[in-house]
Image: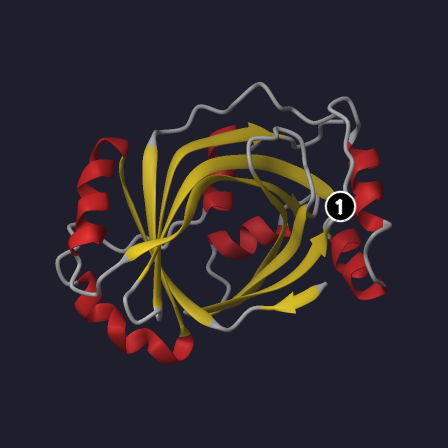
């Protein structure tokens, strides 16, 4: 299934892991009346790029219109499982996604990246194959635990990401599911809303004791695996 998400604005904040309970309390006491939207779960991503890292470079130098490609699945499986191929697009402060659901992916723990990519590719329509082939290199896998909250009026989503882990895949024939990069234990708090609801944001963030960081998990992950 091919999906196009609404255009939205995201506000990202980074904090040390020791502040997790303090941030959860801030969410729960916020006047916007946040409640749990979904059960907490592990999020897993494989980021694909060109061999010379075009998506990474565009993000690093803050090109106003840019995109990145990832395969996402949920749950505790360390290997890619049925999930979603996503093109995440950004233009200035606004972002949106194109998604294609992959419902029958059957990967073995010993499969090569060539085999995994081939399995995904054969399930894609022609337009998605073109995007997938344009970014042929698996660069990194990241995982984190995500909490989800929704405001009383249903217009604002907050997520809290913890237990971040990054695994280097650059130039590897078979996936690296064991050797993790050295990365600081941090929390990423994201506040998200459709583009026409951003007027709610200032009041929600008024008492948040953090500074807007513009954090990119892909960029930070690449810095952590030190391939340069």
Q: In percent of the image, x 21 and y 69: which residue is there?
A: 202
* Horizontal side of residue 100 vs 119, given as left or right: left
Q: Secondary structure at mark 1?
A: loop
Front position in the image: 223 or 145: 145
Above-or-below relation of 208 to 140: below
Vertical comparison of 44 with 173: above or below? below
Mark 1 — residue?
136
> Image quadrant for the C terminus?
top right
**Residue 185: % across, % down:** 34, 29
Horizontally, is 1 left or right of 72 in the view? Answer: right
Q: Give whichever of 146, 48 is nearer the camera.
A: 146
Residue 89 percent location from the top left of the image: 56, 64
Residue name at image x 25 percent, y 73 percent: 200
Is the N terminus in the top left, top right, bottom left or bottom right quadrant?
bottom right
- Measured as percent of width and height from the top left, residue 152 is found at 27, 67
Residue drawn 70% across the image and 66% down it:
2
Question: Can residue 100 be seen at all in this image of the molecule?
Answer: yes
Q: Percent position (x, y) of residue 130?
A: 80, 60
Locate residue 37 relative to residue 126 in the image: left or right.
left
Find the residue positioned furthest to the bottom: 196
State the residue lying farthest toward the top.
Answer: 179
What crowding class fits label 1: few (fewer than 14 Cα within 10 Å), some (14-19), or many (20 or more)?
some
Which picture quadrant has residue 208?
A: bottom left
Q: Quadrant of residue 137?
A: top right
| In front of the other: 74 or 163 | 74
Q: Is residue 57 above or below residue 91?
A: above
């Amino acid at each position: 299934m091919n999906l196009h998400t609404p255009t939205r604005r995201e506000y990202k904040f980074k904090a040390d892991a020791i502040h997790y309970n303090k941030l959860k309390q801030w969410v729960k006491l916020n006047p916007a009346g946040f409640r749990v939207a979904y059960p907490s779960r592990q999020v897993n991503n494989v980021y694909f790029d060109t061999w010379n890292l075009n998506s990474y470079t565009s993000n690093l130098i803050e090109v106003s219109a840019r995109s990145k490609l990832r395969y996402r699945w949920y749950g505790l499986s360390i290997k890619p499982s049925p999930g979603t191929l996503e093109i995440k697009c950004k233009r200035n402060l606004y972002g949106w996604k194109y998604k294609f659901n992959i419902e029958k992916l059957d990967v073995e723990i010993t499969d090569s990246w060539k085999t995994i990519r081939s399995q995904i590719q054969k399930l894609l329509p022609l337009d998605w194959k073109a995007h997938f082939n344009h970014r042929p290199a698996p660069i990194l896998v990241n995982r984190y635990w995500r909490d989800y909250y929704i405001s009383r009026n249903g217009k604002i989503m907050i997520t809290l990401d913890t237990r971040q882990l990054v695994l280097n895949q650059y130039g590897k024939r078979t996936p690296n599911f064991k050797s993790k990069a050295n990365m600081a234990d941090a929390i990423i708090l994201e506040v998200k809303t459709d583009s026409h609801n951003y007027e709610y944001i200032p009041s929600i963030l008024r008492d948040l004791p953090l500074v807007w960081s513009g954090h990119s998990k892909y960029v930070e992950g690449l810095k952590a695996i030190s391939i340069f």
